[in-house]
Amino acid sequence: MKRRVIGVVSGKGGVGKTTVALNLAASLAIQGKRVVLIDTNVGTSHLGISLGMKQPPITLNKLLSSGGSRVVEAAEEYIENMYVIPSDVPSTSFKWENLSKLGEVIRKIDTVISPDYIILDAAPGIGVEARATIVNSDELLFVATPDVPSVADVIRIKELAFKKKHAYVGIVLNMVRGKKWEVKVEHIERVTGLPVIQIIPFDKAVLKSLAKTLPVVVAYPHSKAGKAFRGLASKLSGEPMVSYTPVLGITGYLKRLWIDIFG
């Protein structure tokens, strides 16, 4: 299959974009796909925090400064088949012009890792970081919650992406409670011109998994949200949903062992 670079984008913060990106990446890895997940939100990074990565020695910030020369050191195998490249926390020394080298980093990843998927966890909005993600993505996956401001922001970021002539995967509607005041799927599709390809229900298992610094598909694979995220990966890959628990890489295994022992 042709390698796919998917930018996970949102018009505003607080919609669970990073949660969607990391659980999508983990779900694809469970299917046996080789995945690299990159935090391209270099200004206010959250991905490394969500996965419990404290001060990794090589981050995207450093790769951008060097043109990707240390990709092998930076790409940590978090679970089997899933490699993660976080950004600095905090990113006080980062130079915005370095974002122009994101394409070089992606090409280097292709050379040394040969992934099936590269998932870019973008910054929210339409600033410099989000634009760099859009430019370097083959396809865009929009994340929104079922409320008017979030849906309106999807339209804004789609207008920006349209100028770049990007392909669209569709919308992931996140944290859906099924309440009557939520914006309906058919209305979202009509006003945005994009399909809602997956609904992720509001699920306390997601909050519990965040507290454990693990993707919900790893911590609670049989939860409602866990099944929905694996369903999203199945729709993207065109392959049946699998239900087994992923095998952690050595770093992830030690992290899992620590959590099991000390909580």
Image (cartoon, helix red, strand yellow):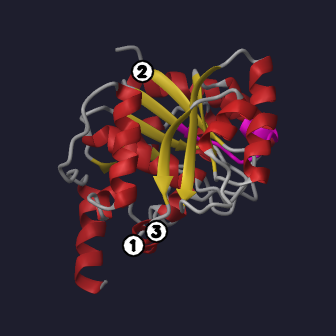
Q: Nearer the viewer, residue 128 or 10?
A: 10
Side of 141 relative to 213 (left or right): right
Say which of 22 and 16 sits in front: 16
Element class at badge 2: helix
Quadrant for residue 157, please give it.
Answer: top right
Residue located at (74% from left, 25% from top) = 161
Few, some or many C-alpha atoms within 10 Å of disc 2 (few <14, some 14-19, many ≥20)?
Answer: few
Q: Can you tell which mark lies on residue 210?
A: 3
Q: Position of residue 182 (x, y in %)?
A: 66, 57
What residue does disc 1 label? 212
Q: State whether residue 158 is above or below residue 199.
A: above
Residue drawn at 35 percent across, 41 percent down: 231
Of all residues, the one furthest to the front in this rendering is 180
* Quarter assignment of residue 190: top right
The answer to if 113 sits in the magenta stretch is no
Which structural element holds mark 1? loop
Q: Residue at x 30, y 32 (%)?
A: 33
Is residue 76 visible in the rendered image? The answer is no
Amino acid of disc 3: Leu
| CB atoms of marks 3 and 1 within 8 Å | yes
